[in-house]
Amino acid sequence: MPRRRWRSNMPAESRAILFVSEFKLRSFRDVPRMFRCSSAVFRQIKHSDGAFRCDLRAQILRKTFHTRSLWRDAAAIQAFVHTEPHTSAMRALHPTYTTAAFAQTPLATLTDYPTWSGVVAMLASPNAHRIDAPV
């Protein structure tokens, strides 16, 4: 199961926002596009103001990708989301997934950073935002 990870220094006294996502792809043919887009977005995060950490988990046989990232505040997340290459990646990937889910929550310390099973639980909660792609 491929994984990718990046971390920067989060000030110890800082509070942060945890953002998690899940993308379930329609077809195995869509996996290379997902990897291309996620590589570009991963590079973007590493240079984004307010990003402290990000991880990607690819469950290729399930055609499922999860992300978790840690941000200074909601404004930093919004600035990232509305900047290239993320905006192009969203447009390119929209037709490739059956569902996408997103959730965010405040995080007091890095020790609260969730495991992948914690990410899946957050995405299954009623507070998660789910998008079903048109058929």
Image: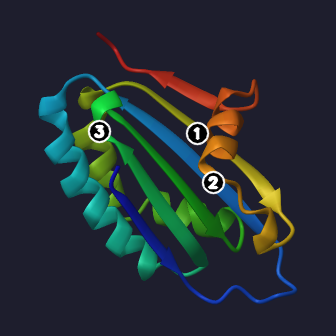
The answer to whether residue 84 of the structure is visible from this angle is no
Q: Amino acid at mark 3?
A: Ile
**Residue 75 placed where, x, y %?**
65, 66
Sequence order check, earlier mark of 1 and 2: 2
Under circle 1, the secondary element is: strand
Looking at this view, is 63 or 14 the one in front? 63
- Number of the label disc, if any, that sits on residue 60: 3
Nearest-to-viewer mark from 3 and 1: 3
Under circle 3, the secondary element is: helix
Whether label 1 touches label 2, CB < 8 Å: yes
Residue at 64% across, 67% down: 70
Q: Is residue 90 above or below residue 126?
A: below
Whether label 3 touches label 1, CB < 8 Å: no
Q: CA distance from mark 2 to mark 3?
A: 22 Å
Residue at 50% across, 52% down: 67
**Residue 59 placed where, x, y %?**
37, 40
On the rendered structure, is 48 left or right of 70? left
The answer to whether residue 126 of the structure is visible from this angle is yes
* Crowd rating for badge 1 (residues with CA inside 10 Å; few <14, some 14–19, many 20+): many
- Number of the label disc, if any, that sits on residue 19: 2
